[in-house]
Amino acid sequence: MELAQVRLLVTDFAGCYRYYRDVLGLKPQFEAEDGPYAKFTPDGGTAGIALQDRAQMAGVLGELAAEPAGHRSLVVLRVDDLDRYCEELTARGAGLLRGPAPMTDRMRVAHLVDPEGNIVELQEWLALRG
């Protein structure tokens, strides 16, 4: 079995699309700012992050639970230089919730929130497990 993607169900598709493309700097596999679906594959990754219009998926399934409140999910992206990446993101309009800061003796992290309330964690590994 292979992980193909993590898909986020969103109501503000265009806003989330622009956030992942323009703020986080991920490259979409194809242009689809109006949705209802888009996939972003981080550099060096095989699995990606996908956005799916919540109403469209509700139509596919015939039903979908009410829109959740609060944070919905946590997307984790690994970066090589956390400080530089956070500077680039804040210059593009991202607001940091926390960090960059140590999480453990092996890792530093920063946290952001996308337009739908999904938490994005950026990780910089300082040392790999032996």
Image: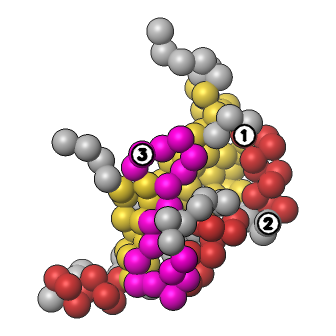
- Label 2 or label 1, whichever comes before in sequence order: 1
Q: Which mark is residue 69?
A: none
Q: Position of residue 1 (x, y in %)?
A: 19, 42
Say whether residue 16 is visible: no
Residue 125 appears left or right of 60: right
Q: Which residue is mark 2?
A: 92
Which-is-in-front pick, marks 3 and 1? 3
- Identity, as a three-letter code, of the amino acid under mark 1: Leu
Depicted 76 relative to depicted 57: above or below: above
Q: Earlier in the sequence, mark 3 or mark 1?
A: 3
Residue 86 position in % (x across, y down)? 76, 50
Residue at mark 3 = 46
Which stretch appears magenta? 31-47
- Give the quarter of the image for residue 23: bottom right
Whole-angstrom CA distance, mark 3 to mark 2, is 26 Å
Which residue sits at x=64%, y=34%?
124
Depth check: 119 or 13 in front?
13
Calculate the distance from the C-alpha at mark 2 to the C-alpha at mark 1: 15 Å
The residue pinned by badge 1 equals 82
Q: Can you name the residue that lies furthest to the top here?
A: 130
Q: Element at badge 2? A: loop
Asked whether residue 65 appears in the rendered view, the answer is: yes
Mark 3 is on which residue type?
Thr
Relative height, residue 33 to residue 1 (above, below): below
